[in-house]
Amino acid sequence: MSDPYETTEQHLERLLRCALNSFDLSDTTVDQLGTALAHSSALHSSHHSAVLHRETYRHTYLLADGTAFTLWELVHGGGRDASVPRRHELYDDEGDAQIAAARLAGTFWDTPAFGEESLRGDMDVLTLLMSVPPAPHPRVYAPDNSADHARRVLRRAENGDRPGAGTAGLLRAAFAHHITQVFGRQCRVEGRDAGFTLYEHAFLLLDGSETSLWEVEHTATPDGRHMCEVYGDEDTARRAMENRTRIC
């Protein structure tokens, strides 16, 4: 993955040039990386199947002020289908990289798609989408730029009824967070494969209270692209998934 003769400057330039989402990195992040003196790259995780090849790389940089900075690179392609080009994504937050990797796995599960183009199939889809999830594991909050994580979740939401300024203001007081995948399923929507994944982003606020954002990642779009929607409660998020199985 990494050329041993490549300078840190060349390495960064290549990563930023290849990444489809490099524009999502903040100006502060890019400025910090501009002071990098050295770097180290390692494979963090991987998934290989007939339909999906995915690797996550951890790139660590030594900055001029003596601190370390980490970029997470997600590389994925169409498994054994060599005609599908490999895509690169960059994240400066490990949680965002984990969500992106889970999104891919949820979309290209190797299990058979369920549901048929019939009333019975549609009802099976709706039942699964609205099913009560198993009891969650106890939350372990991690203090890791949680207010900025909340801002990113809200920023990538494409639904018009996403939480507004009031919620954004409340989450500026978040100092720790925990991400849970509540639901994941691949199904048939109007004759096409679609993947649905539901995440709870739970935040611990400075006053000791807790609040959550509910993120729906899906491919039930006319062109099959990934779409992110964010809601203020679980019931609304599940109703949105239900609606997506009917209108596409």
Image (spheres, rainbow, N blue to C red):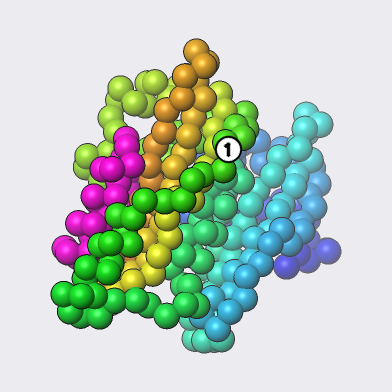
Percent across and percent down for residue 75 are 59, 66
Q: The C terminus appears in which quarter of the rendering?
A: bottom left
Q: Is residue 118 magenta?
A: no
- Which residue is pictured at 71% across the width and 58% down the height? 44
Compared with 79, 178 (above or below) is above
Residue closer to the observer: 242 or 147: 242
Residue 154 image-quadrant placement: top left
Residue 113 seen in the current view = yes
Q: Residue at label 1? A: 138
- Which residue is pictured at 41% across the width and 33% down the height? 212
Percent across and percent down for residue 18 are 56, 62
Q: Tag 1: residue type?
A: Pro
Residue range of the region highlighted in magenta in the rendering: 225-248
Percent across and percent down for residue 192 are 28, 77
- Which residue is pictured at 58% across the width and 79% down the height? 49
- Which residue is pictured at 37% across the width and 77% down the height? 113
Task: State the SS at label 1.
Answer: loop
Percent across and percent down for residue 183 are 42, 55
